[in-house]
Amino acid sequence: MSTATVHLGYAVPRAGIPAPASFRCWVEAALHGAKRRKATELSIRIVDADEGRALNRDYRGKDYATNVLSFEAELPPGLKLPLIGDMVICAPVVAREAAEQGKRARDHWAHLTVHGTLHLLGYDHIVTAEAEAMEALETRILAGLGIADPYAA
């Protein structure tokens, strides 16, 4: 089993945001589901809509706040660190989406944390086959946490 070090940063008030232990649990579930066995370190920053929009615009060319962004670590050749990267989760987008989709906010936070962690491990959903594989893995991981399939209609 991997040992995860999760650094959390908050650019918003912490009211309504899950506890740090929850984020660590969700990251570890994603690492376990992806069969990552070595020590792993990542950072999660919880942001407001303005920062989420600016980051999405600057790094993806999309001028709106999105739910989660993942930035894989780009380490110099030969440098062996457990760092896999940084994740940014936009709190107001998570709250809005959970309400719109009729999901428990905590379950949506868990899903986005798992989703972002898998991105940091190299999973993607641009190509249909990869998207299906990633969604199936997310669904299995979340089921292990007692959370319903987030992709079910």
Image (cartoon, helix red, strand yellow):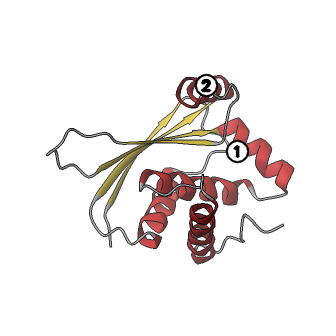
Whichever of callouts 1 and 2 sits on the residue coming sooner in the sequence is 2
x then y, percent, for residue 49: 68, 28
Nearer to us in this view, 8 or 136: 136
x then y, percent, for residue 2: 32, 67
Amino acid type, mark 1: Val
Quadrant that contains the N terminus: bottom left
Please state if 108 lies on the left or on the right of 51 as rendered: right
Q: Nearer the viewer, mark 1 or mark 2?
A: 2
x then y, percent, for residue 143: 63, 75
Disc 2 secondary structure class = helix
Amino acid type, mark 2: Arg
Q: How many tags in the picture? A: 2
Q: Is residue 30 above or below residue 122?
A: below
Instruction: Determine which residue is flagged by label 1.
Output: 94
Instruction: Determine which residue is flagged by label 2.
Output: 57
Q: Which mark is residue 108?
A: none
Disc 1 secondary structure class = helix
